[in-house]
Image (cartoon, rainbow, N blue to C red):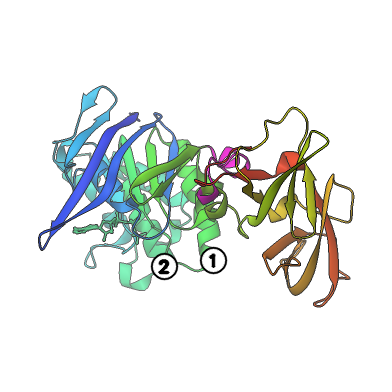
Amino acid sequence: MATSIHLDTVRKEFRTLGNTHVAVDDLSLDIPEGSFTTFVGPSGCGKTTTLRMLAGLETPTSGTVSFGDEDVTDLPPQERNVSMVFQSIALYPHMSVRENIGYGLKIHGVPKSERDERIDEAAEVLQIEQQLEKMPSELSGGQQQRVALGGAFVQDPDVLLLDEPMSDLDAKLKSDLRVEIQRLHQELDTTVVYVTHDQTEAMTMSDQVVLLREGELAQVDPPKRLFDYPNSEYVAQFIGMPSTNVVECSVTEQNSVTSLEGPGLTVPLPAEVKPPASDSVRLGIRPQYLEVGSTGSCTLTVDVEVIETLGTESVVHGRLADGTNFDVVSDAVDDVSAGDKLDVSFDISDAFVFGDDGDTIL
Ligand code: ATP
């Protein structure tokens, strides 16, 4: 039965050669029962350490981990109904695919007929029905990772922990497997916690995304909310591809109207918006929320440097008058070339304003 997970001021320190390193810094978090929650963040921010504490492979230095109402902080892995799949695939080379997937069930005494039924179901969803009687050495990397996932899913764990299970696969296999993992999750009553540094995986698969920064929680929210309402410049920059454009602006006031002034840009703030207290702010504009032309309320001009075509839309990489990097995502730039000046516009309600400490203030 899926369980909710609660972390209460969980801290993990590692001591090496007399130095103390805080890998996870007083992290408090709720993971709803049956949800798909993804941890993202740059290398070293504490994702794997957090996952290992959920598995029971690391013990927190302080704080508590609970599954539902049960405090599991000090429970060893075998006393938690948890399965884990790692980046490196660990299959038993002398066992067939069927035996590998069913191994966990076998050691838990599940009868053969039920084992076979559950293996066949998982194999169907993961599209490895044809491989069941083969040996792992006869499979591709993607098929081997499917077998590892199948083995974890058939055990029907309360919590399934996946640590970068797709990082060694190519882009096409990744996109297929993303869908299959979601199908498995829908069919089973399991809380999934997934670790990745691939934000496409985080944004496409998750009910909620946990973004960490140096062991601390930067923001936890559903993917779309994280994209549209980042609470800081760090979140706005990390989530979204290409990254959010950030433009240094001064805050000016004329005839009781407060405006943000940047390179080739004046953004009058609506009267109902409380003006920033400081003289300067950083304005964040997502490349996806720019329109080509001057239809939006704020306009600026981009010196086009490079255009990348991604099928239906293109990414225009350019600079503003002061050299600030500035990207535009649009499906209306077919006749734009490097060296052109491209007028774009946006609506202030789609932009973010970051204060001195990097927090979103508007
Ligand atoms: P990556 O994306 O690179 O896997 P991560 O976000 O999963 O990174 P962790 O592996 O959790 O990060 O590591 C967090 C920090 O704790 C890092 O600075 C790491 O060097 C340190 N760390 C992790 N495990 C240990 C350990 N066993 N001993 C000492 N330091 C450790």
Task: Looking at the picture, tell me which residue is in the foreground, 313 or 191.
Answer: 313
Q: Residues within 10 Å of mark 2 (few under 14, many from 20)?
A: some
Marks 2/1: CA–CA distance: 10 Å
Left or right placement of residue 20 versus residue 123 in this view:
left
Quadrant of the image for the N terminus? Answer: top left
Q: Residue furthest top?
A: 69
Residue extending furthest bottom?
339
On whether residue 94 falls in the magenta region, the answer is no
Residue name at image x 80 percent, y 77 percent: 338
The residue located at (43%, 40%) in the rendering is 37
Q: Amino acid at mark 2?
A: Asp
Q: Residue 341, labelled with which disc?
A: none
Counting labels gives 2
Q: Is residue 104 visible?
A: yes
Q: Is residue 125 left or right of residue 71?
A: right
Residue beneath disc 2 = 168
**Magenta stretch, overall SS:** helix
Residue type, numbered disc 1: Ala
- The residue tagged 1 is 171
Residue 333 appears in the picture as rendered: no
Residue 307 located left or right of residue 343: left
Q: Residue at x 66, y 56 (%)?
A: 247
